Image: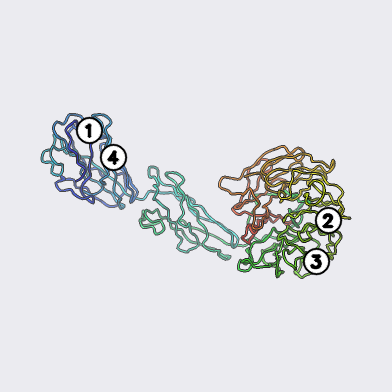
Amino acid sequence: MKNIKKLTSFLLLSLLLTGCGGGSGGGAGAGTNTGTNTGTSTGNPVDTLPVVSNDGGLSFTPSSLTATILPYENKTLSLDIRANRNFPDVVNVAIIDTTGVITDDIRIKAVDKYNYQASVTTRSLKPGRYSGILEVRLCKDSPYSCAQPHDGSPWKLPYSFEVRAPSITVSPAEITASFVPAEEKSFELEVRSEAGIDFINRVGVSVTDPAGLLTNGNAVTKIDKNTIRTTLRMTSKPPVGKYVGALEVRLCGGNINSCDFPYQINPWKIPYNLEVKTNTVTLTPTPGAADWNGYQGNVAHTGYVPVTLNVNAFAPRFLFEIDNSKYMAQGPITTQGDTVYFSAQAANGGSGGAVFAVNESDGKIKWTFPVADGWVNPPAAQNGKVYFMNTATQSSGLWMLDQSNGNRLGKTNVITTISYFYAPVVDGQTVFSRNGPQSQFLSSSSADTLSSNWSFLSDNMEALWSPAVDANYVYMFVPKGNTAGPSGLAIINRQSGKQTTLIAAPDIQASMTRVEPTLCDGVNLLIASNGLSLVNFDLASQKIKWTVKDTFYSNPVCAGSTLYILNGYGVDARSLSTGALLWQWKFPDGVYYDQKPIGANGYLQNMIVTNNVLLLGSFSAVFAVDLSSHQTVWSYPRGGDLALSKNGILYVNKGTSGYGSFMAFNTK
């Protein structure tokens, strides 16, 4: 016995009580307490309470201690004690537990001179039922022997504890899913305990799959005192086939990784029925859609596809993964016909790379065109040909390949030190691309022979820029550079290569404009200065119509009378004619979207606007936002650059963030 204090004043004033016996040491002369462990059982703990009779000098609230306790939990129980008469002479007090159910951590504090609050804490107990009697002794001598008890001592406090795992509900009760090969699939399990049984900090969920297909990585999130949640992921990328098994769910104490203290002998079992299958429905053209044949899908860079999409039909078609032992990040993709085209760089810092053609039907490689050195930039597809540039090497040039087999059809030499560009702009029989040692020239070439039509000195030496084009003119931002006059929007005759107009924009600097002109219609052209402003150039009056200053870090897209642009951590919908804010959409909590250019090479993740939804991506997810309700109507946990083919296949290209893969989704 320890911590026994001799008192000469009124009963229980500043008492220090002690639990003795059992595993706590001591207990000789502790009386007749015969607490028992009756093993696991069912029913209410009160059913097994011992019957006691006490003197009226002390009373307890509650009159007995009952609880249902988690295995290995230290449960603290409260007790109110009232002294109903004076106890003269010396008073030594002890609480005696001979079975080791209660720890030494017994506390008491005075409320007033008659009323006291006490607490006792259970030991870490194995599953079973524990019942017995605690003795509260008031003695004139040592409570070890208590040869001189006060009248009425000892008082007996019966207890009954049931130690067991809680009844839980695991949701879902069964996991059923189908997905395409190599898809990054995850499943969420929620475990909820019965009322009155709280999950404490050291309670974990061990989820094991004897087949080794799924794992939660021993990661658990506590939602509230009765609910914990865990996410299961595939341990591998299984091939096409059906996979049937059952997860084993255990609640554990101690080391969660090894589940040292399982709360029950038999685990809960959650059956799963998974099917890995191809989702290659027959490709058919989508009315209104066109080939996504370059930067932002068209030569005006609007990102607009005039189709109405049924988001309920969205489903993964295939996941394409590049051979990471040979290649690393790829640039934005382009499509024509039933083929997807993209470029990739050599892995491990090597020089060169390749251009790939992939069948849209099944995600299989159609052909590969290797490039020995330099940086291999994104391709454009048009006229049955593929056009791309490799740069930052003595053999840099504009290449032309045969779409059907990847054979080389032509190449022009371009000497440049700049590494990466957007895809060339191909419109009809003309290719618009970069040229010059610092890529400061805009060149017009024949789409059939690559022979030069003209070159225009732009003084724009930023790595990423791409002109917008219509039937008569080419539009691009021109910084002040070494030329006379202010910076601004250059309007160039596409036949002669001569600048016809410069709409001055002195507030826009070349270093700000990593986002390209968006030619929304014949009148409104937009340029975003990254992080500073959005400018609308009125092509009819050849003046700036309006400027809005805010944290804009993307290319704008436009449809009808509305433009959409990423602003901070959300999207603004604004009036094309005035720039006024119409509505906003914010990324959900926990979804990360960097405000700066995203991608291994600075490529910005983009948006696509259709007749009814806005499609946009973040690092971790892609979203469809309804243009009428302004609400998210579809999402998928995979981020990246977007493209939408004429067959209605949506591509989410994670390759621009350095991962070398893209997911294809059916949209009908």
Would you place residue 132 above or below residue 275 in this image?
above
Disc 3 designates what residue? 412
* Residue 157 horizontal/vertical position (percent): 22, 40
Residue 76 image point, x, y percent: 31, 43
Q: Nearer the viewer, residue 595 or 103?
A: 595
Residue 95 picture quarter: top left
Secondary structure of the residue carrying tag 1 is loop
Residue 31 position within the rendered picture, expressed as x and y whole percent measured from the top left: 15, 45
- The kind of residue tagged 1 is Leu
Q: Nearer the viewer, residue 480 or 292?
A: 480
Callout in the foreground (4, 1): 1
Q: Residue at x 40, y 47 (%)?
A: 199
Tell me if I can see residue 52 in this picture: no
Spatial CA span between label 1 and label 2:
96 Å
Q: Which residue is mark 4?
A: 119
Circle 1: is it few (<14), some (14-19), or many (20+) Cα within 10 Å? some
Considering the numbered disc 2 on the image, is that residue within a helix, a strand or a loop? Answer: strand
Q: Earlier in the sequence, mark 4 or mark 1?
A: 1
| Depicted 566 relative to depicted 445: above or below | above
Q: CA distance from mark 3 to mark 4?
A: 87 Å
Q: Nearer the viewer, mark 3 or mark 4?
A: 3
Three-letter residue code for mark 3: Thr
Amino acid type, residue under disc 4 in the picture: Ser
Residue occupying image coordinates x 25% and y 51%: 38
Circle 4 — which element? strand
- Give the residue type at disc 2: Phe
Which residue, given by chain and number where applicable, does mark 2 sit on? 456
Label located before the other in sequence (4 or 2): 4
Q: Which marked residue is nearer to the observer: mark 1 or mark 3?
A: 3
Q: How many marks?
A: 4
Number of residues whose C-alpha sits closer than 10 Å to that of mark 2, classed few (under 14), some (14–19) or many (20 or more): some
